[in-house]
Image (spheres, rainbow, N blue to C red):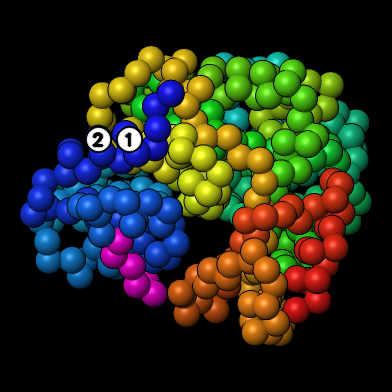
């Protein structure tokens, strides 16, 4: 078995003594999980976007990791002679945008996608869509995140309202499946596709967000309970197919997959970046064994280090998670938060975003639970979560 300690040693030996590996981010938590193990590693964060932080950096020659690459970040790193390790931004756009993502996935896993129609509201009637994909159905704009650009249509007047506002804006319409959403972090290291620990995705809790499809947490323990060995095999196979195709196009490091099971496992979307849950998954892994952590594979993959063992051995060595969960409190129209009450809960850690962000639905903080789950059944919070919600 390959241990996390071995991967950390490999990473540390690859970083020049006077040129630390920089993680540049507006939210320090994104780069945390291994910071006390890495000797040549520095997190640079501030209450501004990543590009603005990079503009202020006076260093040069360092290797840089960001949470998610974009054209401005890529350009600034080149100008400042910083080696950006993230995959190129054109790949991020291709895999992350809802429409180009669907068109790409349709070529490689056509049987494992929800029934979908790409259209413009002015060119398609509500009745035609209802007949084709049922009602209610989901529509998404090409660019959106954390569920803010995902909506449910069940009535003619909702479609007419959409037509008035965005008659010729391209949208993705898909069948609505009311079943558990499973999310998984996948890492590409060299030609190896490493599948992390699946978690149940907590979505749309009204006390935590104003958006019904916004992600407000993960529960690794519940996923372990509800997924059979056959489910895990299917999820791993899909991540392998997608991952191998991304490797061929030049992707490396982490990406996330959201999946749902209907008659078969379906891929809802790709998150072409380091998923926000990777830091906590890493902490849970470190807390529960000596195996390889998902964030260590991400850093090693971005640094293009040689694999210390075969891909199958690496997969076996990834640390399994038995328990652990988190809730994300997002900026609502009204938030009243009593942090002192939350701090009294055993096994619970509060992680503040550190941002002075007034944007609607921005993350305010996380409640991380290392000992327990937070969900009883699909869409049903347990007693611990309900106690948190009361605060």
Q: Which mark is residue 7?
A: 1
Q: Secondary structure at mark 1?
A: helix
Q: Is residue 174 visible to the viewer in this orientation of the structure?
A: no
From the image, tell me which residue sits under label 2.
Answer: 10
Which residue is found at the position 38% from the left and 15% from the top? 310
- Residue extent of the magenta highlight: 43-48
Which residue is found at the position 50% from the left and 76% from the top? 357
Which residue is found at the position 38% from the left and 51% from the top? 34
Specify whether 129 is left or right of 269.
Answer: right
Which residue is found at the position 17% from the left and 39% from the top? 13
User: Looking at the picture, how far across and down is residue 49, in whole percent?
Assistant: 37, 66
Q: Is residue 349 magenta?
A: no
- Corner quadrant of residue 268: top right
- Corner quadrant of residue 224: top right
Q: Secondary structure at mark 2?
A: helix
Q: Is residue 45 magenta?
A: yes
In the image shown, does 339 or 361 lie closer to the viewer?
Answer: 339
User: Looking at the picture, how far across and down is residue 306, in whole percent?
Assistant: 26, 24
| Image vertical order of residue 65 relative to residue 315, above or below | below
């Amino acid at each position: 078995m390959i241990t996390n300690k071995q991967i950390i040693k490999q990473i540390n030996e690859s970083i020049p003594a006077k040129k630390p590996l920089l993680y540049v981010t507006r939210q320090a938590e994104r780069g945390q999980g291994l910071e006390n193990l890495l000797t040549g590693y520095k997190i640079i964060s501030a209450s501004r976007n990543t590009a603005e932080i990079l503009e202020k950096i006076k260093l040069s020659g360092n290797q840089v990791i960001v949470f998610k690459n974009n054209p401005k970040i890529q350009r600034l790193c080149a100008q400042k002679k910083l080696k950006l390790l993230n995959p190129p931004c054109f790949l991020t756009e291709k895999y992350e945008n809802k429409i180009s993502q669907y068109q790409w996935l349709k070529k490689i896993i056509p049987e494992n996608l929800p029934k979908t129609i790409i259209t413009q509201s002015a060119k398609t009637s509500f009745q035609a869509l209802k007949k084709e994909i049922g009602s209610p159905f989901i529509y998404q704009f090409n660019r959106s995140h954390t569920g803010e650009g995902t909506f449910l249509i069940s009535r003619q007047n909702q479609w007419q309202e959409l037509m008035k506002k965005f008659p010729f804006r391209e949208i993705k319409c898909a069948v609505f499946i009311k079943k558990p959403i499973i999310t998984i972090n996948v890492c590409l290291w060299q030609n190896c596709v490493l599948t992390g620990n699946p978690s149940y995705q907590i979505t749309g809790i009204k006390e935590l967000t104003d958006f019904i499809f916004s992600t407000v947490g993960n529960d690794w323990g519940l996923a372990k309970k509800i997924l059979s060995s056959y489910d895990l095999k299917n999820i791993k196979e899909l991540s392998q197919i997608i991952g191998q195709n991304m490797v061929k196009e030049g992707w490396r490091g982490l990406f996330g997959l959201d999946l749902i099971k209907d008659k078969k496992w379906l891929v809802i979307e790709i998150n072409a970046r380091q998923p926000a849950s990777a830091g906590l998954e890493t902490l849970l892994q470190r807390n529960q064994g000596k195996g390889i952590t998902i964030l260590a594979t991400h850093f090693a993959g971005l640094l293009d280090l040689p694999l210390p063992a075969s891909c199958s051995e690496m997969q076996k060595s990834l640390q399994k998670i038995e328990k652990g969960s988190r809730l994300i409190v997002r900026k609502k129209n009204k938030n009243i938060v009593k942090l002192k009450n939350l701090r009294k809960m055993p096994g619970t850690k509060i992680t503040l975003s550190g941002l002075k962000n007034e944007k609607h639905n921005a993350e305010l903080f996380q409640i991380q639970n290392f000992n327990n789950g937070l969900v009883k059944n699909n869409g049903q919070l347990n007693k611990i979560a309900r106690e948190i919600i009361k605060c």
